[in-house]
Amino acid sequence: MKQIRIRGGYSLSGNISISGAKNSAVALIPAAILSDDTVTIDNIPEISDIDALNDILEYLGAKVKREDTIMTIDSTSIINKEIPEEISKKLRASYYFMAALLGKYNKVEMYFPGGCSIGARPIDQTLKAFKTLGATIVENDGKYTITAEELKGATIYLDMPSVGATINTLLVATKAKGETIVENAAKEPEIVSVATFLNTMGAKITGAGTSQIKITGVEHLHGGFTEVIPDRIEAGTYVIAGALLGDNLTIRNIIPSHIDSLTSKLQEMGYPLKITEDTITISKIDIKKPVDIKTLGYPGFPTDLQQPMTTLLTLCDGLSTIEETLYENRFQNVPYLEKMGAKIKQRGRTILIEGVDSLHGEHVVATDLRAGACMILAGLVADGETVVASVEHVLRGYDNIIHKLQNVGAKIELEEI
Ligand code: EPU
């Protein structure tokens, strides 16, 4: 077990360089197995979710090479066998293999995916897309056996713009016969990066990044190369760290437009930001105006930044609100912030945050990945010492977080217990 110990109150200055996006890399890796050749992906982040996907690739018999941030995947030796529950439940993104194996072999056997416990997270939209494309699904005790005599293009209307269902549909439809149209598709940059990657391998996808995506199926995908886009959630988390404690803290290697929803809120709060083509520089300010936030799909305010942002709002001058519209259980960080001195009331899917002058160090828990980021930010700004337990959740999604923060002046250590 691991925990993080933080001595709070130190300012942060210098540079933090952002790694490849978790939620892009975890889709590109399963997408790679659709190729009938070797593919290379650069800018892979060093996080445990990638190790879990690596395990699935090796379990299936793919040949994987990892050198620094480069991953080379040769799927020609894959054996399409059942993916056991203990592997699939390690992460949400395991279900991208459901789509990739179905697309490639017309058959897949695996279990319900895992992921942070932030809500029910059903997969009905993915299953609806598989069925519409011609698959038959048998579910038995959490195990899905999905088969198709022939996958045929069709129009799929998603009930909500689900990131996972959109990517899964792209993966299957790329190998289906004829044209598929996804209506009400998710528009996240991670969708665009998967579509671009598939196109470099020979797929025919247009419209990714809009709510209507068209896919014309192809028989074969050849080898290809892609680079993972910068992680907008990691970037946003460190921008918030700069808002709390920055003394000219620069976040580098980012696509600033991917976090416009965050930077516009910070500007509303009174932060002057220096934004270039690939950096944002931010310093803390004394008086922070309160704001109201509602989480939405891209380009709205990302749910994945809601918990880190809550830490900042606990220290605003007045009453802020956050409405979480995506997940029913993404406020597990709130009791721990309250333990540290925050004043927060929950009303259904909304929290009301009354700003306080300071937080104080405490023993707290990272109940999930982004709750962990929230607690680390709280520890960095709090008076005294904070210990964050269960940080395995954080290491699933933040590349080298301890070193990145130490390098800019934070007093933070990872401890084995
Ligand atoms: N939903 C359904 N049915 C479905 C699919 C989704 O009801 O079949 C609902 C979900 O319950 C949720 C909403 O639709 O309320 C959106 O879910 P979505 O499918 O878009 O989320 P996801 O693909 O499971 C990805 C990220 C999440 C991120 C969301 C939203 C990955 C591996 N995960 O999840 O990231 O919160 O998109 O942007 O890409 C994280 O990184 O901490 C994280 C949880």
Image: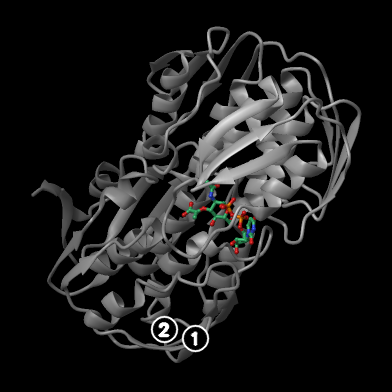
Q: Nearer the viewer, residue 368 or 319?
A: 368
Residue 316, numbered label:
2
- Does the closest atom of ligand 1 sit within 8 Å of the Cβ of label 2? no
Q: Secondary structure at mark 2?
A: loop
Residue identifier under label 1: 320
* Image point (79%, 23%), residue name: 203
* Image point (8%, 49%), residue name: 417
- Give the vertical position of 352 relative to 245 (above or below): below
Q: Nearer the viewer, residue 144 or 381?
A: 144
Q: What sort of colour scheme is used for the picture? A: one colour
- Does the closest atom of ligand 1 sit within 8 Å of the Cβ of label 1? no
Could you tell me the amino acid type at mark 1?
A: Ser
* Quarter residue 246 falls in: bottom left
Task: Answer with left or right where residue 256 lies relative to residue 315.
Answer: right
Task: Give the distance between the C-alpha atoms of the residues marked 1 and 2, in whole angstroms.
Answer: 8 Å
Identity of the residue furthest to the right in this view: 178
Q: Quadrant of ligand 1?
A: bottom right
Task: Answer with left or right where residue 366 lies relative to residue 213.
Answer: left
Residue 239, numbered label:
none
Q: Can you give x and y, in whole percent of width and height, for residue 346 in the image?
A: 44, 87
Q: Can you give x and y, in whole percent of width and height, for residue 331 in the image?
A: 42, 74
Do labels 1 and 2 touch, CB within 8 Å?
yes
- Give the vertical position of 172 relative to 339 (above or below): above
Q: Can you give x and y, in whole percent of width and height, for residue 250 in the image?
A: 43, 50
Disc 1: CA contacts within 10 A as few (<14), some (14-19) or many (>=20): many
